[in-house]
Image (cartoon, helix red, strand yellow):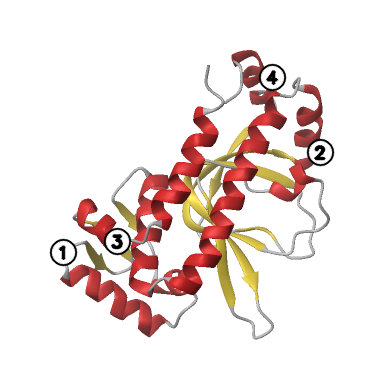
Amino acid sequence: MLPPPDQERLSRHLRPCELPVGQVLYKPGGTIEHVYFPTIGVVSLLAELASGQQVEVATVGDEGMVGLPIFLGAGPPTERAAVQISGAALTMTAEQFRHDVAVLDGSLQGAMQRYTQATFTQLARNAACNRGHAIRQRCARWLLMTADRMHSDFFELTQEFMAQMLGVRRATVSEVAAALAADGCIAYRRGTITITDRARLRSQACECYEVVRDAFTRAYQSALP
């Protein structure tokens, strides 16, 4: 989304890093020291309830950045950012990112504004989806989004994370995964998911999958010449 000269300037401040599963990138009320641009993998943004339960409110993959409060100039984060599916990223300090937003002639700011708008769409659809759609539809949508970000129909995913993602008990996750497997959509074995029939899985997902995907597609297409 950035002009080549700005890409070059930004790349001088980025360094590659691994994103091991379970790594916490920032905590509620804490300080965000670095921002992360995932190249593969999935990071969850989790709301922590008074009961101690953690519920996923959004995810970030290779379409975006972890550390949006830094761009928005907000105070300490209210959510936890944790790696849900291991991968890799490019990272820089939050201080350097603020500097680059200011000096890259508006191109980075414009790209981040478009990403922020698409993220707001994801947050809104997640809220509506959690209230209005069946667990099976929500699970199918999330599996498709994960496959898109992993660029693969095979990825590791535990029942614990799936329960967190859907805001349900692990027993419910087992029932939903078994139903999708019985329908020929997926195969689920020992913490790994394989999408065996993508078209069939899409038929099981709610319309939120298309809405969120299209929001990010429009954000990026609008930046192209």
Q: What is the tally of numbered marks visible in this picture?
A: 4
Instruction: Check disc 1 and give the amino acid type.
Output: Gly
Which residue position holds label 3? 193
First in sequence: mark 4 or mark 3? 4
Residue type at mark 2: give it.
Answer: Glu
> Under tag 1, what secondary structure?
loop
Of 209 and 89, which appears nearest the observer? 209
Of mark 3 and mark 2, the one earlier in the sequence is: 2
Which residue carries the number 1 mark? 184
Residue at the image point whose x is 81% and y is 58% from the top: 76
Q: Which amino acid does label 4 sit on?
A: Arg
Q: Can residue 103 be seen in this view?
A: yes
Q: Earlier in the sequence, mark 1 or mark 4?
A: 4
Circle 3: element type: strand
Residue 184: quarter of image? bottom left
Query: Residue at coordinates 52% horizontally, 59% vertically from top-left?
Result: 125
For badge 3, the amino acid type reads Ile
Mark 2 sits on what residue? 95
Disc 4, SS: helix
User: Which residue is under mark 4?
Assistant: 9
Asked whether, in this view, residue 107 is left or right of residue 137, the answer is: right
How far from the left and from the top, in percent, is residue 195?
25, 56
